[in-house]
């Protein structure tokens, strides 16, 4: 329709402008041909994001005609919704979270993603003491999002209030009163940015990636738009709690952005009017051309004073570990122990947890961690994925650990967790863990994590299998490229008995450990369990070398792979082509094998037929008697 209008205007010598567009990212050859014919005829082309601007230039649009802009919906004036149903939002003090999911979440193919997302929304609502409100897509009339709201409600433990469809101005008013906005759709994010409300977007494909990141980019908050597959692996809750941590700073920044945007918008309309008046020099100002980059938000870095002293850092650099003292009070310990027991007994379940049973000492018999609940027992050896639990995550995200990670990875770097887990040595049991390093190719990461925080939930002693270390061995580097367990020769050289230090700690005491430090632990010969929580922190850009996937961000925002590492997209695309070529070669080889089998069968049949002919020729003919 827009292309037809451009061509019609051009044919009648009427100047044409187009504003507020998202182009691509994928277009068909026919669409490319139509756009390449139409875009150069525009006097002014307003686009919402840099990707659209780049595509427009590639399709022949005049560079001076391309202007990045805020979406027109950003400037929509709010209107108070009518009716008693909105009374609770007008002056109440209740904390609430606005949620918008598109219609695809009602489809069977989204069932797993919806289940995991609902579990994380439950945790978020409970942790923030907030209610969940489903806000369907704006527009009037029936909403296609309503089934998605009902599907979400069916997965939640928390109550979900589902609103009727509101007009755009009413939704803008509503977003201003929300404490958080979670959306897979575009407009709720635009309204949230305009209203000064912290928001997180979840994109489901390449197109919605462009749209949602574009909605957040004017504020420099596109790092709070994440892909659905990452949310499905449990990365949503840590990232949204990081956004909540910075909520006051985000609100202040968005308020400043809204004030500056009014001036940008006036300049944009001035440029539009000049370009539509052929008698006036229509050269726009640079400010109107690049307005959306002005509001970019700088890195969010905590300003609290350092907690660890330089002397402590010196000891850590020397030894490869540091005693952090008792970080959990007796009350906090009791709550966390109760939560861990409830998870082991199945009273609390999260769909992304991985569980591993104890082997009574035999390390080589250990099964791999399994996703899903394996039965009611307090004798699990390991439970991974505990970043799904808000109580555990609250501990993992302490400012002290933020400071430690900033020291290792840089103050402005995002930090992710490879795993947050409970390690358990049941009373009189437990698995022996041999000398090893927590790094190397065995972990299937593109870079080694360096930091592990370990906190005892129970007293840890020699009798019940406390951690044993060889101080200073982190400075040896990796003793094996593969990592993990070291060789017998390495043990003989570096792990002499007199060098071992036993890290006995009281319940609630924490240890900072370098991942290359040689360490092990024995079985539990005592009468009580020895449980601990640990979190392995790493550079937020770390990816799995097998899948190319990321890990949950706990400090900082989400660095989009395509934006942060564009080469990876090319590598993944090349791998896709190679897999397709390999599959095609396998199919061809199979067809050749089947063809050879058919030919072999034909040969055998021909051979049998030839033998039958030979046999017939060898028999005497019956002669007639004259």
Image (cartoon, rainbow, N blue to C red):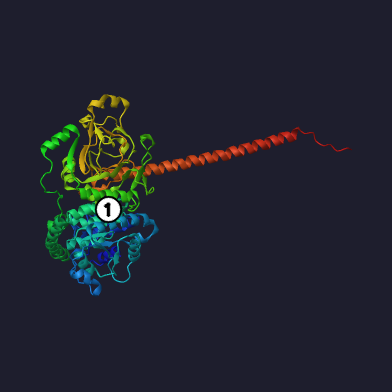
Q: Is residue 28 above or below residue 594?
A: below
Q: Position of residue 417 (x, y in %)?
A: 25, 45
Q: Is residue 229 left or right of residue 65?
A: right
**Which residue in the rendered view is the most extreme toward the right?**
626
464 or 123, nearer to the observer: 464
Q: Nearer the viewer, residue 284 or 269?
A: 269
Q: Whole-percent x and y of residue 617? A: 74, 34
Total residue callouts: 1
Q: Which residue is mark 1?
A: 236
Q: Mark 1: few, some, or many residues within 10 Å (few <14, many ≥20)?
A: many
Instruction: Locate residue 383 relative to residue 296 in the image: left or right.
Output: right
Up/down of 615 relative to 277, above or below = above
Secondary structure under the numbered disc 1 in the rendered image: helix
User: Is the N terminus in the top left, top right, bottom left or bottom right quadrant?
Assistant: bottom left
Q: Judge left or right: residue 306 versus residue 54.
A: left
- The reply to whether residue 253 is in sight is yes
Position of the C terminus by quadrant: top right
At 21% from the left and 67% from the top, the residue drawn is 174
Q: Residue at x 30, y 24 (%)?
A: 489
Q: Residue furthest front?
A: 527
Residue 42 visible in the current orientation = no
Q: From the viewer's perspective, is residue 30 above or below residue 427?
A: below
Q: Nearer the viewer, residue 82 or 46?
A: 82
Rendered location of residue 309, percent (x, y):
11, 39
Q: Quadrant of residue 465?
A: top left
Residue 513 in percent (x, y) is at: 22, 37
């Amino acid at each position: 329709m827009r292309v037809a209008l451009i061509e019609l205007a051009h044919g009648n010598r009427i100047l044409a402008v187009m504003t507020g567009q998202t182009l691509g990212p994928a277009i068909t050859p026919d669409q490319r041909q139509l756009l390449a014919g139409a875009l150069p005829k525009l006097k002014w082309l307003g686009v919402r994001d840099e990707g659209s601007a780049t595509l427009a230039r590639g399709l022949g649009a005049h560079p001076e005609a391309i202007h990045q802009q805020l979406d027109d919906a950003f400037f929509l004036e709010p209107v108070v919704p009518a009716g008693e149903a909105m009374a609770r939002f007008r002056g109440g003090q209740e904390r609430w979270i606005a949620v918008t999911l598109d219609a695809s979440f009602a489809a069977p193919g989204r069932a797993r993603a919806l289940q995991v997302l609902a579990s994380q929304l439950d945790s978020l609502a409970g942790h923030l003491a907030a209610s969940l409100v489903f806000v369907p897509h704006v527009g009037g009339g029936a909403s296609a999002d309503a089934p998605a709201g009902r599907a979400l409600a069916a997965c939640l433990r928390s109550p979900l209030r589902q609103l009727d469809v509101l007009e755009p101005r009413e939704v803008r008013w509503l977003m201003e009163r929300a404490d958080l906005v979670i959306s897979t759709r575009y407009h709720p994010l635009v309204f949230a940015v305009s209203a000064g409300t912290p928001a997180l977007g979840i994109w489901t494909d390449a197109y919605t990636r462009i749209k949602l990141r574009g909605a957040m980019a004017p504020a420099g908050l596109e790092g709070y738009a994440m892909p659905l597959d990452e949310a499905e692996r449990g990365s949503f809750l840590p990232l949204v709690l990081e956004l909540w941590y910075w909520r006051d700073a985000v609100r202040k920044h968005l308020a400043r952005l809204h004030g500056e945007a009014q001036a940008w918008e006036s300049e944009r309309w001035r440029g539009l009017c000049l370009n539509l008046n052929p008698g006036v020099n229509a050269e726009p100002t640079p400010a109107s051309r690049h307005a959306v980059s002005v509001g970019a938000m700088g890195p969010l870095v905590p300003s609290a004073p350092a907690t660890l002293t330089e002397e402590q850092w010196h000891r850590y650099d020397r030894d490869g570990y540091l005693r952090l003292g008792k970080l959990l009070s007796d009350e906090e310990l009791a709550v966390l122990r109760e939560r861990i027991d409830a998870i082991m007994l199945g009273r609390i379940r999260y769909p992304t947890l991985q569980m591993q049973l104890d082997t009574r000492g035999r390390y080589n018999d250990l099964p791999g961690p399994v996703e899903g609940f394996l039965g009611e027992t307090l004798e699990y050896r390991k439970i991974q994925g505990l970043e799904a639990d808000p109580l555990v995550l609250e501990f993992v995200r302490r400012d002290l650990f933020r400071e430690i990670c900033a020291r290792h990875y840089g103050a402005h770097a995002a930090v992710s967790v490879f795993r947050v887990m409970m390690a358990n040595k049941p009373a009189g049991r437990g698995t022996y863990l041999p000398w090893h390093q927590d790094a190397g190719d065995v972990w299937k990461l593109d870079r080694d994590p360096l930091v592990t925080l370990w906190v005892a939930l129970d007293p840890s002693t020699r009798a019940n299998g406390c951690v044993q270390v060889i101080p200073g061995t982190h400075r040896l580097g990796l003793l094996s490229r593969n990592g993990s367990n070291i060789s017998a020769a390495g043990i003989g050289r570096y792990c002499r008995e007199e060098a071992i230090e036993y890290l006995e700690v009281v319940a609630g005491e924490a240890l900072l450990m370098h991942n290359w430090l040689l360490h092990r632990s024995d079985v539990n010969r005592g009468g009580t369990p020895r449980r601990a929580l640990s979190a392995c922190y790493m550079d937020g850009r770390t990816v799995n070398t097998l899948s190319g996937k990321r890990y949950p961000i706990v400090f900082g925002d989400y660095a989009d792979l395509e934006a942060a590492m564009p080469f990876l997209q090319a590598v993944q695309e090349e791998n896709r082509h190679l897999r397709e070529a390999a599959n095609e070669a396998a199919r061809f080889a199979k067809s050749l094998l089947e063809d050879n089998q058919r030919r072999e069968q034909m040969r055998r049949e021909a051979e049998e037929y030839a033998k039958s002919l030979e046999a017939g020729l060898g028999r005497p003919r019956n002669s007639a008697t004259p």
